[in-house]
Amino acid sequence: MVRTMPSRTADGTDICRTAGHKEILQPKWIHMTGTAGGADIGIFFPVKSTVYALREYRQGSWNAMNAAGSAQRLERSYLTLWFEHGAAPEGAQYAYVLLPGYSEAATAILYCRI
């Protein structure tokens, strides 16, 4: 099976190039290239935030979620993003804006305009 990893960038720099590697970032924006036309996603962070990122391969079948789905096993590369905010944070904040369908250039331009 050939493994491909769609492009993932933070402020224009590749992130999580190796599966299983966690990174700690303070990005202004993140872009994830989709696997089909129009499936790109931009994320804009209006306030400074520490974001954790992990790329990993996951396997499964549609049948595991829906009996009518295909039993063929698939493997895809996923990027998980999260904030470590603790159980009961006080005085902490984070914010993000999801930009479905935004290219990397459009995500960067939006950040520069705000």
Image (cartoon, rainbow, N blue to C red):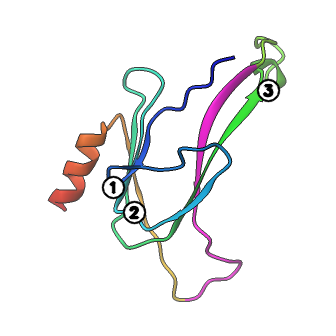
| Label 3 crowd (10 A; few <14 / some 14-19 / many >=20) | few
Estimate the spatial distance between the alpha carbons at disc 1 and disc 3, rounded to whole Å.
Answer: 35 Å
Residue under label 2: 27
Disc 1 to disc 2: CB gap under 8 Å:
yes
Q: Residue furthest left?
A: 113
Circle nearer the viewer, 1 or 3 = 1
In percent of width and height, residue 99 lies at 36, 45
Quadrant of the rendered structure where residue 83 is? bottom right
Identify the residue at image location x=15%, y=58%: 113
Residue under label 3: 65
Residue 74, numbered label: none
Check disc 2 and give the amino acid type.
Pro
In percent of width and height, residue 8 lies at 45, 43
Query: In terms of secondary structure, where does tag 2 sit?
Result: loop
- Mark 1 and mark 3 lie on one chain; the one further toward the N terminus is 1
Query: In the image, which residues are magenta?
Result: 74-90
| Label 2 crowd (10 A; few <14 / some 14-19 / many >=20) | some
Residue 11, numbered label: 1
In percent of width and height, residue 89 lies at 62, 83
- Mark 2 and mark 3 lie on one chain; the one further toward the N terminus is 2
Quadrant of the rendered structure where residue 48 is? bottom left
Estimate the spatial distance between the alpha carbons at disc 1 and disc 2, rounded to whole Å.
Answer: 6 Å
Q: Nearer the viewer, residue 64 or 22?
A: 22
In percent of width and height, residue 1 lies at 69, 17
Identify the residue at image location x=28%, y=47%: 107
Query: In terms of secondary structure, where does tag 1 sit?
Result: loop
Q: Nearer the viewer, residue 12 or 109?
A: 12
Disc 2 to disc 3: CB gap under 8 Å:
no
Quadrant of the rendered structure where residue 57 is? top right
